[in-house]
Image: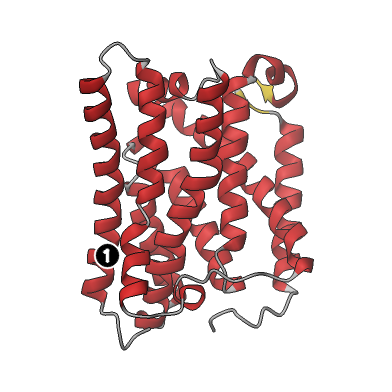
Amino acid sequence: MNKTLTIQSVIMITIACLFTGFGGVTFVLSIGTALFPESDSRFLNILSIFIGQGIMVLPVFAFIHLNKLSIYETIRLKPIPMNSVFPVIILSLGTIILSDEIDRMISLVFPVSDFIEKLSELVRFDTKVNAFFLILATVIIAPFSEEVIFRGFLQHFLERYWQDITKAVLVTSLGFAMIHLNPGWIIQIYLLGVILGYLAWKTGSIVPGLILHALNNGLALILQNLQSSLESIYIWKSHVSPLFLAAAIFIFIKGYKSLNRIPFKTAIK
């Protein structure tokens, strides 16, 4: 991998991925609005995200194909031991709940932006078609594309290039947080990126990150669409219920300790 890649080429490929994704969103919105001016703007927005997230990863795969590299080795697309799946899931659930509370605490200092309010409206399940594309785009396609680009490709290279796992994870997490284009999310997405980076390094695979990423996005969709039903159980005075927070801390620590007891042969030391 090091013989083929340089840090300049890795950065350029990562940027190309981002431009490809954003370009896909812009193209779909522009063409769709021009050809179907009377169409449902929500559906066009959702479709543009679906396509943009889907094609975002193409520069990485094109590079791998042109250089005849192993896709599984280059982006760490490897299976993980079955005994690690449950620890990954409970660590993920703990991470998601704690991240939600961090988000609520930050909102006390930084008011909710118009971007967040518009996003909340966008992810509403108003029709079956919109719900289908939203779930597919945010729970499957987005986690896959982002984990391949950031933890599988960028962080994987930086770990080997710098020989400093911590630096590689922190720098990759910063880039991951910045592409979400919302200052109000920087802290919680950065911390989420650190956990995702740890999982990729520890297991030598992006599969655990895919699990956490998919669960995070899926539960966010559920919370947005069933907020009134879940509020009395999950929320306490505009914050996550202390019972859920205590459970989140417990399962996060439990999952972390369990993962550290598993001797992953694929982990980079």
Task: Name the element at disc 1.
Answer: helix
Farthest-out residue, bottom: 3
Picture quadrant of residue 82: bottom right
Instruction: Please state if 24 lies on the left or on the right of 206 as rendered.
Output: left
Dot 1 corresponds to which residue?
13
Mark 1: few/some/many CA within 10 Å (<14, 14-19, 20+): many
State the quadrant of the C terminus: bottom right
Q: How is the image coloured?
A: secondary structure
- What residue is rendered at 60% in x and 80% in y? 266
- The answer to which of 45 and 202 lies nearer the viewer is 45
- The answer to which of 74 and 250 lies nearer the viewer is 74
Type of amino acid at the residue the image marks with label 1: Ile
- Residue 48 in picture, x, y percent from top left: 35, 34
State the quadrant of the N terminus: bottom left
Where is 15 relative to 240, above or below?
below
- Residue 175 in picture, x, y percent from top left: 33, 55
- Residue 163 in picture, x, y percent from top left: 41, 83
Picture quadrant of residue 257: bottom right
